[in-house]
Image (cartoon, helix red, strand yellow):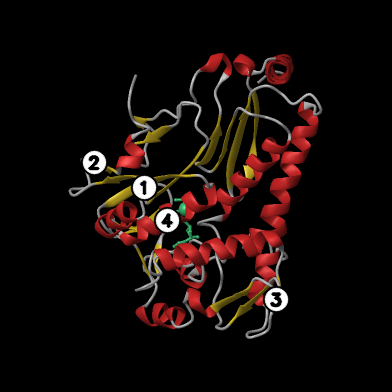
Amino acid sequence: MSGFRRRHAYLITFLVLLFAGILLLVRPTGGIQQLRGYTMGTTYRIQIVDMPAALSSAEIAADVSALLLALDTGIFSTYAANSELSRFNRAPLNQPFAASAELLAVLTLAQEIAELSDGAFDVTVGGLVNLWGFGPSIQVLGDDVPAQQEIDSQLQSVGYELLKIDQARGEITRLADFYVDLSGIAKGYAVDQLAAYFDAAGVENYFLEIGGELRIRGEKPGGTSWVPAIETPQDSTPQVYAVFFTDGAEIALAGSGDYRNYFEVDGRRYSHEIDPRNGRPVSHSLAAVYVIDDSAARADALATAYMVLGLEDARELALRTVQAAYFIYSTDGVEFEDYVTPEFANYLRSD
Ligand code: ADP
Ligand code: MG
């Protein structure tokens, strides 16, 4: 490339960037303010209507990134060596650990979902998550999957009942040498915290999302409903599978699936949801689950619990607990079928 053309290319790039920058700053799409970024190993997207009078866009952006940073690297990350969770994971056994209100809240909810799902959701499964290569520790899996002996040895310390919570004292204790992984619940919790922030700021219409876990309140400008869509459970280009209508209702929606985060050995797919009963990635006909709840943290954890339980047990649990849930499964790995609980069906009416 000649010097002249190179300068030309720089100029065009500069102009494009400048133009894009201006668009981003002064032209919110259709009265919606957008904020995007990275947190918890994934992306987040915030859309709010009607800006609060007391806060500028810059203040909101600063508050949001401070909030997410505090929750991610400050508390829940297993990738950050000095997060509160990482320190707890290194804490001596049988010695109470003073936990923050946030960690206490998430662990308390995690234990509730563990009991509800008969241990299918179990945050003490982290050692196995790491062993199968889905955690922060670098694993060279090569062409092989972990040996049964390694799985058995990790399984010995897994068990949510071995994590003691003392609500009154705000203390948590490890009764076994497990490794807590909150990736199946922390994103949802962070979405709930964002919702609390915007509620307090007086924002009544928003769409908040971290890594696919959502919280929706109110409507879009012009009184139209936020319309979340469910993707076809394939790892190729995302395609809309179903849309649903919130009609101004305040809801949280979370999904779990084995089609994004997995690896393959000899044509077999290993998902990032680990069954704490056998220490292995789940493998069954259920391809994806979506859950609606008031709380995004609860929806997030339940979606993971259902994925581990598999279609039959998950459906039974969702019906028994009157939970809004949407299951996508495949018996032949090609065609998808779905099962929608009556509570979820309310959101699928098309008009
Ligand atoms: P995604 O939304 O990306 O599908 P999930 O919310 O389903 O993710 O959470 C999956 C993550 O939860 C895994 O990557 C792992 O870190 C953790 N995990 C895996 N198995 C379990 C389990 N049985 N109970 C709790 N957490 C789990
Ligand atoms: Mg989840």
Q: Which mark is residue 336?
A: 2
Distance between the alpha carbons at the discs numbered 1 and 2: 12 Å
Residue drawn at (27%, 56%), measured in percent from left and top? 316
The CA span between labels 1 and 3 is: 34 Å
Give the vertical position of 85 relative to 291 (above or below). Answer: below
Where's the N terminus, which quadrant? top right
Which residue is more in the foreground, 206 or 275?
206
Q: Is residue 141 visible?
A: no
Q: Which mark is residue 351?
A: none
Q: Earlier in the sequence, mark 2 or mark 4?
A: 4
| Residue for badge 3 | 97
Callout 3 amino acid: Phe
Q: How far, Cα to Cα, is label 3 from label 2?
A: 46 Å
Mark 2: C-beta under 8 Å from nearest atom of ligand 1: no
Look at the numbered disc 4 and give the secondary structure of its residue: helix
Q: Quadrant of residue 44?
A: top right
User: Badge 3, how many Cα within 10 Å: few under 14, some, many 20+?
Assistant: some
- Which circle marks residue 304 in the picture? 4
Mark 1 near mark 3, Cβ–Cβ under 8 Å? Answer: no
Relative height, residue 289 to residue 263 (above, below): above
Which percent across, then down, holds residue 217?
56, 32
- Distance, label 4 to label 3, CA atoms, is 27 Å
CB-based contact (under 8 Å), mark 1 and mark 2: no
Residue type indicated by callout 4: Thr
Determine crowd level at label 2: few under 14, some 14-19, many 20+ residues with C-alpha closer than 10 A: some
Q: Nearer the viewer, residue 288 or 293?
A: 293
> On screen, 285 above or below 209?
below
Give the image location of residue 121, x and y in percent. 43, 64
Disc nearest the viewer among 1 and 2:
1
